[in-house]
Image (cartoon, rainbow, N blue to C red):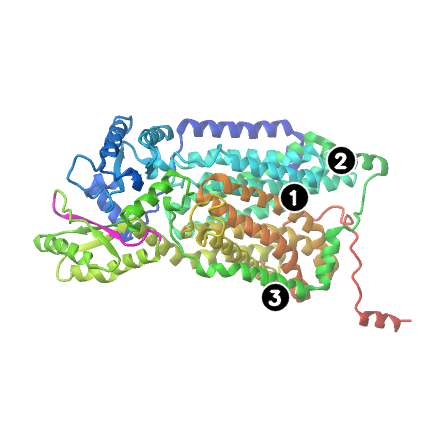
Amino acid sequence: MAALARWCIRRSAVVIVLWLAAFAGVATAAAVTGSAYSNDYDIPGTESSTVSRLLEQRFPDRAGDTDTIVWHTADQAGTVRSADVERRMTAALGRVADLPGVVSVTGPYGTDDTSRISADQHTAYATVVFREPAADLGKDEVRRVLDTARSAAVPGLEVEMGGAGAGLTETAGPAHLSEAIGVAVAAVVLFLAFGSLAATLLPIATALVGVGTAYAAIGLLGHAMNVADFAPMLGMLIGLGVGIDYALFIVTRHRRGLRQGLPVAEAAQRAVTTSGRAVIFAGATVCLALLGMLVLRLSFLNGVAVAAALTVALTVAASITLLPALLGLIGMRALNRRERRRLAEDGPRTRTVPGLATRWASFVERHPKVLGGVAVAVMLALALPTLSLRLGTSDQGNNPETSTTRQAYDLLAEGFGPGFNGPLTLIGSIDGAEDRMAFTRLTTTLRTTEGVASVSAADLGGTGDTGVITVVPTTAPQSPDTSGLVERLRTDVLPKAEEGTSLRVYVGGLTAGYDDFATVIVSKLPLFVGVVVALGCVLLLLAFRSIGIPVKAAVMNVAAVAASFGVVVAVFQWGWGSEPLGLGRAGPIEPFLPVIMVSVLFGLSMDYQVFLVSRMYEEWQHTRDNRVAVRVGLAETSRVINSAAVIMIAVFSAFVLSGDRIIAMFGIGLAAAVALDAFVLRTLLVPALMHLLGGANWWLPGWLERMLPRISIEAPDPDPDQRPLPVPRPRAPEEDAARTLVP
């Protein structure tokens, strides 16, 4: 580390040029090749996957993406069959059909098909088929379709558009607004902490270069593996948070070295060889936690895991190479003017005056039971909503109520029933006349099944070896009753219809696919959590040579995950404030959210654990006094941990403005987790427990001690006397009495 730091400082211009060249090269390559993201939730082997495959092979016209133009008339405007409404909508649909990229438009007028008009005749819809899948459509292309359809709207006639294509037209604001706000807030916090504009800009510049390079690299990664379209935004969210924090830790140590009178180059080198090593260890734990998703063997999550881990790895690399080069470049300007003047007039400061952090550390030492109890109560209260967690996938019914997709969704649900937005597709594999008769009779059985609103006629296709039936439930796609209908069809209704035949019928569709995805995720979640926890415990065991430290870290991490999930459930599933925040209607939690959040939160929680306990461990080795070790460790690290937490909370919270419900879930969940981890767990519950456990914190069986290799997270500071003066610990009455007996 020392050699790397010296090289980067001496050749700062080379390092900066190399990073900028890497960023420019990757960004150019990504722009030339374009993106290739995918949101394929398909899990091979499930019924919904089988339905999708058979539809694509045998009924390709049913497998593509289509959008829906919906119009609704108020009572005073008459029905959708009135001459004026029919004339206006027929003309508008004709203009839509002539637009580039539109293959066909099928509406309710001019045919005997009345299924596209609601029973009260106040709502109707037309189906728009695009030439390309929604993922390949241009935003402007779809915007022209929406504007053309809406041109027919007049007072009393409302026209909206729903579907994947229409969703492309809805954005919450200017591109990357959320990132800009998060970075701006982080800059304010850094300036308040440093008082130096140059020192403030360094962590931000380092994080932006690392994250920007990773963002472009993820675009290239999409050509090599399945990467979800939210992966770049998720990587940016995580990368900005950890990148600024990692740079903050190194700059803080560098500034301390300057105040002690060290030359700029030596201060930067010491910062990298001490805090830089902790940054590498912390980043490695985050990457391992993220890559733990690979054990699930789900292609949809593999790309997310690699993309997020790549972002963290590049931010760590920037922190230990680009940052020292920039520190050498700005010289003494890492200190503010007052600090530079004090250094010139009074000389180096070898000891720091006790402050609020030291007094807080002493306060926790005096009241560990009370404060620990308060922290436990807070975490339990916030974790309670997690017990009602329900997994499912949001749809356009969860969009903000002002969006055209949400209004189209609501109009269809009101006019045709809540299940209309999520019909089930039953596809049968038919072999012979007996199977065809059984499949045809199935429609009669389905019409009398509880929870079914309507059933289409059986479509046996051209070859007759595959049949399709569309079932519209009586309840919404996200309703537990709809999931219950899927389960009832699969376990009761369809097996009875198949008896005595070779017929095999599969259930697919929106709800069925989401339920299959959630079932697979939940079944693999224990293995995944076990692997992540085990890896984290092994790393901490090697670093701190203690049984108690890894066990407490695992418990704290689980507590942070549970409490943050409680916040997510309250906001998104229960709807506490979701509409005012522009996050749309309440609904289930995305099935993949627990997996990704567990990965990220375990990694981030480990960061704070490492920075906090490594200082305590250093003091323990120096004094062998647990109370002193915990008090000094908390006093020296709590301020920088809290500053880092505020930055991360600001960055994560800003992503609520992204306009993407999934990213907003991650933003709120991660912001809540970091706040609880930093302000409740690491600065309150962890030190309180460590005071109560005493020397047991550092216990390790002798046989295990001899077996473990020795690693060091943070190299000892070459000047160990640079510790703050601790606030004297109040003596207990029995200690004073004992002192009076000593002559």
Gap in angstroms between the C-alphas marked 2 and 3: 43 Å
Residue mark closest to the camera, 1 vs 2 = 1
Q: Which residues are magenta?
A: 463-478
Residue type pointed to by label 1: Phe
| Residue neighbourhood size for the residue with mark 2, other residues' Cα within 10 Å, grouped as few (<14), some (14–19), many (≥20) | some
Kindly give the residue lying farthest to the right in the view shown.
743
Element type at marker 2? loop
Percent x, y of residue 336: 74, 35
On whether residue 433 falls in the magenta region, the answer is: no
On whether residue 466 falls in the magenta region, the answer is: yes
Label 2 vs 3, first from the N-terminus: 2
- Badge number at residue 249: 1
Gap in angstroms between the C-alphas marked 3 and 1: 33 Å
Element type at marker 1? helix
Residue drawn at (62%, 56%) of the image:
680
Quadrant where the C terminus sits is bottom right
